[in-house]
């Protein structure tokens, strides 16, 4: 089957760089499956799971807290804020993140500008997504 | 001529100093290797980020409502300098070089009638600038207790800078840090952060083909608004890592020459010690012989 190069980088390291057949990314406006030959796009990501398909099977599932993705017909580059394999997510850490994000959102909702509130909302949603994924894993 | 005992004490003390500098050199070498590896692994992200940003920025920069982080506030009256140094000394000219560079910059800006504010990262830089420019220092950040500088630290700094920009506390922001050229040379460098110096969009497209037209989801402006703060954090992260690698490199070479100097000193002192000992023996012999002759 046709393949394209997938690169997954976080600020701290290069996590993945190899040809794959399909990747599903959590784009800001809904999940997006990308196959080879996709139209060029630049997409913002929300918190969610990136699934990588090779030889007809899902071989990697990683949780990303947010980031960006650049798609060209023969290459996909994901700039993730923070990527963890789904299997090594910890429930307690996710719960702690949700708690801090909720507190931050409360504070932002009480006093912040709309932009600040939106940012806090995004990080809360991302933390909730992480908790959900950790629960399911 | 110094007496034997004081010479012996001196030699012993220089020897233990040499042991310390040698150990510090080893530690710095080990840390340098780690810091270099970390700086290396941060590079791919920064490169991809620069490519995307270059492409986006070119599309948006012309529009009147371009974000302030990209085009600045339109004035250049208040300058914010972020000065990155180490937390610890004994690293040769590492901290002083950045300090001098920053001092020259502050002076140049103030001569032009601008207001300067300094955010000092690392204890040594703050200590250096406090002597003359204490009133300009608006904040000090130190990561002395942090074992391994991570992205969170950089994000913290960038959040602080962005908050200041939102509050209109400065117009132009740049960063002064030691660029890591190689183990023995670190170059104090100034880098403009706000307004952002846009990296050139890389032209991977071959001649004769149509450049790819990107679709954006959400809109360009929204992506850019999210991308710019991230880019700022990445710039800080990179400079923190480079500075850390440079610090260890500088300490390593400083300790290497200190070890060598201590060795030379020990040689000189030992020679002196032996000569004094011989002179003493000779004198005693002469005393005995002349005493015997007198009988």
Image (cartoon, rainbow, N blue to C red):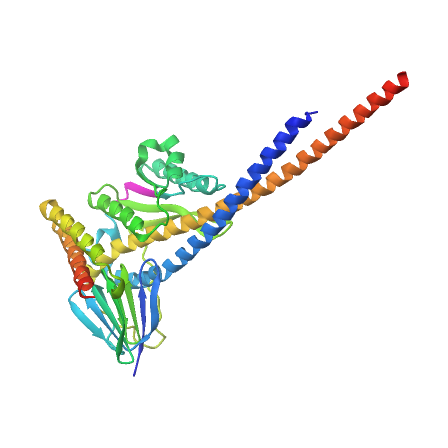
- Residue at 39 percent across and 34 percent down: it is B127
Query: Where is A73 relative to B252, above or below?
Result: below
Provide residue B66's location: percent of width, then percent of height: 21, 56
Indicate yes or no whether the magenta region holds residue B86: no
Image quadrant assignment for residue B263: top right
Above or below, B129 relative to A108:
above
Magenta span covers which residues?
B75-82
Quadrant where the image shows the N terminus of chain B: top right
Q: How many marks?
A: 0
Q: Residue at x 80, y 27 (%)?
A: B282
Decide if residue A136 is in sight here.
Answer: yes
- Give the side of residue A132 with respect to residue A68, left or right: left
Q: Where is residue A39 drawn, in percent x and y?
A: 24, 75
| Residue B41 screen position, x and y as percent | 38, 60
For this view, does A28 lie left or right of residue B177? left
Name the one closer to the observer, B138 or B61.
B138
* Magenta run includes residue B81: yes
Q: Position of residue B274 (x, y in %)?
A: 72, 33
Query: Farthest residue in the bottom direction?
Result: A1
Relative to residue B89, is residue B276 depicted above or below? above
Q: Nearer the viewer, residue B224 or B114?
A: B224
The residue at the point 47 percent across, 51 percent down is B30
For residue A41, say whether it is visible: no
Of the pair A50 and A92, the residue shown nearer to us = A92
Magenta part, dominant SS? strand
Find the residue positioned furthest to the left.
Answer: A110
């Amino acid at each position: 089957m046709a393949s394209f190069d997938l690169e997954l980088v976080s600020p701290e390291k290069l996590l993945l760089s190899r040809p794959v057949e399909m990747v599903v990314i959590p784009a800001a406006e809904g999940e997006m499956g990308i196959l080879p030959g996709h139209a060029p796009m630049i997409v913002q990501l929300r918190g969610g799971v990136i699934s990588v398909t090779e030889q007809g099977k899902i071989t990697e599932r990683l949780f990303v807290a947010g980031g960006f993705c650049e798609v060209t017909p023969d290459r996909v580059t994901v700039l993730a804020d923070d990527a963890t394999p789904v299997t090594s997510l910890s429930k307690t850490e996710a719960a702690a993140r949700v708690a801090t994000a909720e507190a931050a959102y409360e504070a932002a909702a009480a006093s912040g500008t709309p932009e600040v509130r939106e940012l806090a909302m995004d990080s809360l949603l991302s933390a909730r997504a992480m908790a959900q994924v950790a629960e399911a894993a | 001529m110094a007496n034997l005992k004081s010479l012996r004490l001196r030699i012993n003390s220089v020897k233990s100093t040499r042991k310390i500098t040698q150990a510090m050199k080893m530690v710095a070498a080990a840390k340098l290797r780690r810091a270099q590896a970390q700086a290396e692994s941060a590079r791919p992200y920064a490169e991809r980020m620069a490519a995307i940003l270059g492409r986006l920025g070119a599309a948006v920069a012309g529009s009147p409502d371009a974000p302030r982080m990209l085009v600045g506030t339109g004035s250049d009256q208040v300058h914010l300098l972020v000065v990155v140094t180490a937390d610890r000394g004994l690293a040769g000219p590492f901290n002083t070089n950045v300090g001098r560079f920053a001092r020259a910059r502050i002076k140049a800006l103030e001569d032009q009638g601008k207001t300067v504010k300094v955010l000092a990262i690392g204890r040594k830089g703050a200590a250096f600038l406090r002597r003359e420019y204490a009133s300009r220092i608006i904040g000090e950040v130190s990561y002395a207790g942090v074992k391994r500088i991570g992205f969170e630290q950089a994000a913290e700094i960038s959040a602080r800078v962005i908050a200041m920009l939102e509050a209109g506390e400065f117009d132009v922001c740049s960063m002064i840090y030691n660029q890591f050229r190689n183990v023995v040379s670190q170059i104090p460098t100034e880098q403009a952060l706000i307004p952002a110096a846009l990296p050139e969009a890389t032209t991977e497209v071959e001649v004769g083909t149509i450049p790819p037209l990107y679709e954006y989801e959400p809109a360009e402006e929204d992506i850019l608004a999210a991308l710019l703060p991230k880019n700022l954090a990445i710039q800080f992260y990179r400079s923190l890592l480079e500075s850390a690698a440079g610090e260890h490199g500088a300490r390593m070479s400083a300790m290497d020459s200190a070890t060598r100097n201590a060795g030379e000193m020990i040689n000189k002192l030992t020679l002196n010690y032996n000569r004094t000992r011989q002179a003493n023996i000779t004198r005693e012999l002469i005393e005995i012989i002349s005493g015997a002759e007198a009988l």
